[in-house]
Image: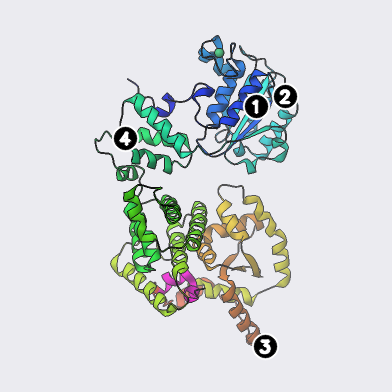
Amino acid sequence: MQYISLYRKYRPQNFKEVVGQEIIKKILQNSIKNNKINHAYIFSGPRGTGKTSIAKIFAKAVNCFDNKDGDTCGECDFCKNANHNELDIIEIDAASNNGVEEIREIRNNVKLMPASGKYKVYIIDEVHMLSTSAFNALLKTLEEPPEHVIFILATTEIHKIPETVLSRCQKFDFKNIPEKQIIERIKKILEIEQKNLPIEVIELIAKISNGGLRDAINLTDQIISINEDNITLDSVYNLIGSVPEETIFNLILAIKNKDIKKGLDLINELYKSGKNLTDITERMQLLIRDIVINNVTRKYFTKEYEEKLEQFDDIDSETSTHMATLLFELGNELKKTSNKKILFEIYFIKLVRLFTAEETNKKDIKEKIIQTQTNDINKEENIIEEPIDISYKKQRINNTLAEADKNLKVEFIKKFEEINDYISNKEYNVIANLLLKSTPEVVSTRNIIFIYKNNFEVVLFDKNIEELQKLINKVYNKKYDIVAINLEEWKKIKEKYINDMKNGIKYKYEDEKQIEKTKKTKTSQIEKTLESMFGDDIVTIK
Ligand SMILES: [Zn+2]
């Protein structure tokens, strides 16, 4: 027998079966009942909250020959006949068909009458993925839609939809489905399937699905197919390639105890065993949430879990709020970078800093980090994360200053805005974002110095320097050797430069490759790693 996934098997066939989104269902059903159908709808909201399911049901219900209270009857020729469905309900995935051609085809086809129903319904999923020209083509159709056509646009990112399109649609904002409703739905499915799962496992599924019912059902599907008698929380974590609960506890504990060495060791271990750092960040966020809840109210969790949370009782609400904010930031930043480990480490230190009291001996921390890094390097021959070589930086700064030209800088900055065009380009968006955060400070014919406020941006710059050069090459049609430093460093360099000028010391351009041959850079591995990770400002704890 062919296996049908639980999600497909239990996909709702009518409004009644849809979990959550009560108000949206009601409005849509009423509009069918009162025959007040719009020609364009936009469904926005998080993934797995029922946008496509409701779009499909609505498409069927408007065409149903015998609709009951605005819902599908399930009995008539339209409801039962899948062929009719296919001819009059057209689903387009904008994520795969983002071309103008597909939309143009719609424009030509909308004139055709529906095959058997009253309406031809176009469901465009992930509509934010359409290109600008495709949106324009769509807009033309939305401006004068034929009587028999309905568009349902679904998106997880409403802010990417042009206002001109939005203004022609009736908007529905889909909400996350409450954990309680997800739990009820899973219980119901398990009952029909005659399967059993411990309640804490079901609760965990609901929790990690983040209000998305589709994810929750898919996860349940995977878990029951393990076919074990004794399914525990950790079997869920294992399944999703996630780390056990204890690891997350240990990370937060290391932060609270300001145990940088232990934390960095743990991160290294997790990274080496291929664990997903984004997932770990989310789990840490969830734990912080639980800690906050447990601090203000008891008996919200099971007694067992409350006892585990007790070790965090001394984290006050202000600190936990800051922790949550940092973790949220980290989660966002992780999505944008391929240098996940280093970013995670930087944020780990930032989190520890929240707990570092003023009087903490700053030197002590620096020593601890050096020790950690030393251990790291001694322990493993095969470090996955190669420390980046930044020995070229000094030379490049010198070279830029040697040939600095104000007019070139003005010209360069004029065109800098064009980098904005690459923000929506998947290949370059991270790089473009990173570059736009910088200030081009010194420009010569072959070099540029970029300044950043935060050192971790400099770190990211150094790590992505080749990509950055490629982007600049594209925008300016010219190859530059570039270098980035943080503002503090730049102030010092600038001061020295001005002094040197006053004293008649001239800077000379020297070929980088030439220098490399003659001068063996002696920066030690540890210093390089440290500097590339944190810059020199690690000790300036604020
Ligand atoms: Zn029907």
Q: Amino acid at mark 3?
A: Lys
State yes or no: residue 132 in magenta.
no
Q: Nearer the viewer, mark 1 or mark 4?
A: 4
Mark closest to the chain's N terminus, 1 or 4? 1
Which disc, if any, is residue 197? 4
Q: Are marks 4 and 3 in contact (CB under 8 Å)?
A: no
Q: CA distance from mark 1 to mark 4?
A: 41 Å
The residues colored magenta run 527-541
Horizontal and vertical percent for residue 419?
Answer: 65, 55
Please determine whether, in this image, residue 328 is positioned above or below residue 263.
above
Mark closest to the chain's N terminus, 3 or 1? 1
Residue with the mark numbered 3: 502
The answer to whether residue 389 is seen in the rendering is no
* Crowd around label 1: few <14 · some 14–19 · many ≥20 (10 Å): many
Which disc, if any, is residue 145? 2
Which disc, if any, is residue 151? 1
Quadrant in which residue 144 is drawn = top right
